[in-house]
């Protein structure tokens, strides 16, 4: 397998853009990535496009990549459409990496895009609910939580006043609260950190600092989650250009290399809610590194508790030390493990098809020292963790990437 470099990245601001089309969002992100890579569009040999909800929310059920890219003059090349729920574009990135690593292509484009906002919010929730088994998923989760004992996982209002995923995240959070002495205040501190960072990110959906008191009083979603602890609906796009070592040598003197790219699927078994934990060792082994080598990380924090849960599952934070790490600020930009230096999904935003490549956008820029007021001090190794959908009690898809400079 050949070495693969990330030659360029691009990203729109995430937010509510009812009057902006998917074509326009894709154009902005792709043009930024091509400019960053100093590559002309006609040099792209193949494109891998991640999107999850356009069929349900816009009616564009098929050929989404061809439609959006042809509108900006990218056509005739192989264009592959990838749907993997919230992990759509990180799955697309994996396929783009594999194509270059195998020698099939020397320069490929990866794109992720999504428009989640709809005039009728129920349409958005219905689309998100499709990222699980629509025939028996809810029944399985109810039966699963009943077997575990305690409060049910799915509570009143799920799927109508909120996404069903919030019930799943709250259920997981309550388990970790019991096991590791975490409190709602700990999760509020994570939210405060994320909003403070996002306030310095010009591409974030939310750009206002908040207090612990504001987070706790922002409206209950499902305990322990409050509104400010949860990722919003959002629209946006992100992109990356991948190339071979030979091609990278002609484009940049400071490439960022893909050290590991791992994609796995969940399981219906009870251990299915530990999907990140299952595949993390494979990612570290591929990179020839350990958790202790990671300098900066972007994790899939659809909620504040998810940030610390995934850090534990990835082996980056000992569970018994989780509360202390939050209290001591070790996840801050100047902490020992800067986490979600973009502001994370809960503050930067979460247009699901764009999320994976947006995480990669952040880590690549961090490793290049281009993150301005959010810059982590001299990172050499970065990691992204992006989950998607629900299968059984946990994620249906898990994408893990490790990058180095």
Image (tube, rainbow, N blue to C red):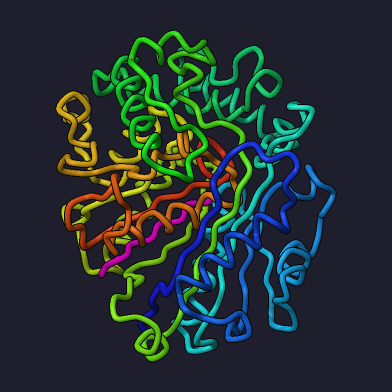
Residue 150's x, y, as percent? Answer: 45, 13
Residue 90's x, y, as percent? Answer: 51, 58
Does 400 sit left or right of 127 as displayed? left
Q: Residue at x 40, y 37 (%)?
A: 198
Work out which quarter of the rendered image holds the C terminus and state it. Answer: bottom left
Does 34 sit left or right of 47 as displayed? left
Task: Using the image, determine if residue 221 lies above or below residue 42.
Answer: above
Q: Nearer the viewer, residue 268 or 29?
A: 29
Q: Is residue 370 visible?
A: yes
Task: Using the image, determine if residue 103 lies above or below residue 212.
Answer: below
Residue 120's x, y, as percent? Answer: 79, 27
Does 246 sit left or right of 147 as displayed? left
Q: Residue at x 56, y 58 (%)?
A: 89
Q: Is residue 1 visible?
A: no
Examine the image and state in which quarter residue 366 appears: bottom left
Main secondary-structure element of the magenta-colored stretch: strand
Residue sitting farthest toward the right: 59
Work out which quarter of the rendered image holds the N terminus and state it. Answer: bottom left
State how many labels appear: 0
Q: Is residue 403 magenta?
A: yes
Does 133 sit left or right of 363 as displayed? right
- Residue range corresponding to the magenta coloring: 397-405
Q: Residue at x 52, y 10 (%)?
A: 219
Residue 290's x, y, as percent? Answer: 20, 58
Q: Nearer the viewer, residue 72 or 114?
A: 72
Examine the image and state in which quarter residue 197 appears: top left
Q: Residue at x 59, y 63 (%)?
A: 111
Q: Nearer the viewer, residue 276 or 402?
A: 402
């Amino acid at each position: 397998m050949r070495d693969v470099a990330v030659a360029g990245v691009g990203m729109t601001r995430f937010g509510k853009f009812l009057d902006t089309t998917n074509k326009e969002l894709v154009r902005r992100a792709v043009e930024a990535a091509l400019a960053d890579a100093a590559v002309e569009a006609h040099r792209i040999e193949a494109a891998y496009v991640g999107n999850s909800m356009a069929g349900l929310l816009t009616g564009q059920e098929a050929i989404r990549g061809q439609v959006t890219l042809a509108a900006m003059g990218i056509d005739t090349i192989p264009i592959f459409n990838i749907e993997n729920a919230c992990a759509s574009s990180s799955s697309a990135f994996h396929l783009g990496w594999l194509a270059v690593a195998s020698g099939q292509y020397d320069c490929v484009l990866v794109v992720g895009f999504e428009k989640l906002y709809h005039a009728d919010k129920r349409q958005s929730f219905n689309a998100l609910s499709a990222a699980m088994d629509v025939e028996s998923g809810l029944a399985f989760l109810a039966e699963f939580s009943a077997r575990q004992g305690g409060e049910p996982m799915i509570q009143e209002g799920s799927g109508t006043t909120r996404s069903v995923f919030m019930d799943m995240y709250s259920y997981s959070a309550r388990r970790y609260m019991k096991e590791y002495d975490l409190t709602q205040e700990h999760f509020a501190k994570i939210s405060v950190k994320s909003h403070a960072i996002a306030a310095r990110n010009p591409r974030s959906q939310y750009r206002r600092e908040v207090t612990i008191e504001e987070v706790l009083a922002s409206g209950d979603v499902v305990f322990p989650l409050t509104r400010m602890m949860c990722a919003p609906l959002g629209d946006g796009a992100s992109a990356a250009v991948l190339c071979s070592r030979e091609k990278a040598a002609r484009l940049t003197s400071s490439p960022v290399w893909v050290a590991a790219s791992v994609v796995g699927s969940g399981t219906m078994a009870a251990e299915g809610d530990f999907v990140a934990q299952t595949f993390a060792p494979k990612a570290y082994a591929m990179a020839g590194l350990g958790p202790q080598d990671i300098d900066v990380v972007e994790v899939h924090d659809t909620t504040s508790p998810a940030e610390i849960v995934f850090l534990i599952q990835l082996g980056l934070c000992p569970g018994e030390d989780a509360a202390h790490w939050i209290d001591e600020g070790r996840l801050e930009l100047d902490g020992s493990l800067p986490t979600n230096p973009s502001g994370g999904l809960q503050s930067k935003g979460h247009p699901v098809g764009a999320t994976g490549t947006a995480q990669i956008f952040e880590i690549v820029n961090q490793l290049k020292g281009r993150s301005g007021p959010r810059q982590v001090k001299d990172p050499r190794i970065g990691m992204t963790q992006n989950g998607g959908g629900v299968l059984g009690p946990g994620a249906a898809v898990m994408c893990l990437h490790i990058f180095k400079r």
